[in-house]
Image (cartoon, helix red, strand yellow):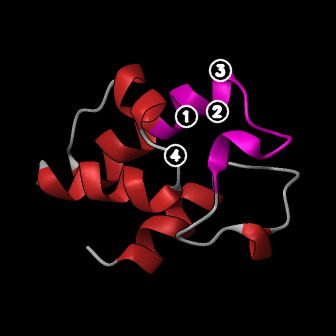
Amino acid sequence: MEIQEFINCFAAQFDDTDPEIFKAETKFREIEEWSSLTTLAIIAMVDDEYKVKIKGDDIRNAQSIEDLYNIVKSRM
């Protein structure tokens, strides 16, 4: 798994946010479209795409997309 692939999958969970803002260092909770439903979509995406289980605590502990990527990668 490469980080750019993860970023692309992450960005696909957003309908109204410009894909250009999604970078490794993006603080995803600061995205205007971020919500509890997006959190659930990210958890489901990680499970479907990478066969890794993450929890809300993992997302709360991550600041950036790269932080979340590192959590997922460590469990693969």
Residue 31 falls inside the magenta stretch: yes
Q: Quadrant of residue 67?
A: bottom left
Residue 72 locus on image (x, y percent): 26, 50
Q: Name the mark nearer the viewer: 4 or 3.
A: 4
Compare marks 4 and 3 and give the one earlier in the sequence: 3
Tell me whether the residue at label 3 lies in contact with that at label 2, contact meaning CB atoms closer than 8 angstroms.
Answer: yes
Q: Secondary structure at mark 1?
A: helix
Find the distance from the CA under tag 4 to the CA under tag 3. 16 Å
- Quadrant in the rendering for residue 33: top right
The amino acid beneath tag 4 is: Gln
Distance, label 3 to label 2, CA atoms, is 5 Å
Q: CA distance from mark 1 to mark 2?
A: 5 Å
Residue 63: mark in rendering: 4
Identify the mark nearer the N-term, 1 or 3.
3
Along the horizontal axis of the image, is 23 left or right of 30? left
Classed neighbour count for the residue bearing mark 4: other residues with Cα under 10 Å, few (<14), some (14–19), many (≥20): some
Reading the image, the residue beneath label 2 is 38
Where residue 2 sits: x, y (%)?
Answer: 32, 78
Find disc 3 in the rendering and name its residue: 36
Asked if labels 2 and 1 touch by Cβ distance under 8 angstroms, the answer is yes
- Magenta stretch in the rendered image: 27-42
Residue at 28% in and 58% down: 70
Q: Assess whether mark 1 and mark 4 are in contact (beta carbons under 8 angstroms).
A: no
Relative to 11, is 72 above or below?
Answer: above
Which quarter of the image is occupied by the N terminus? bottom left
* Magenta stretch contains residue 13: no
Residue position for label 1: 41
Neighbour class for label 1 at 10 Å: few (<14), some, many (≥20)?
Answer: some
Give the residue drawn at x 78%, y 46%: 31
On the image, which quarter does residue 44 sit in? top left
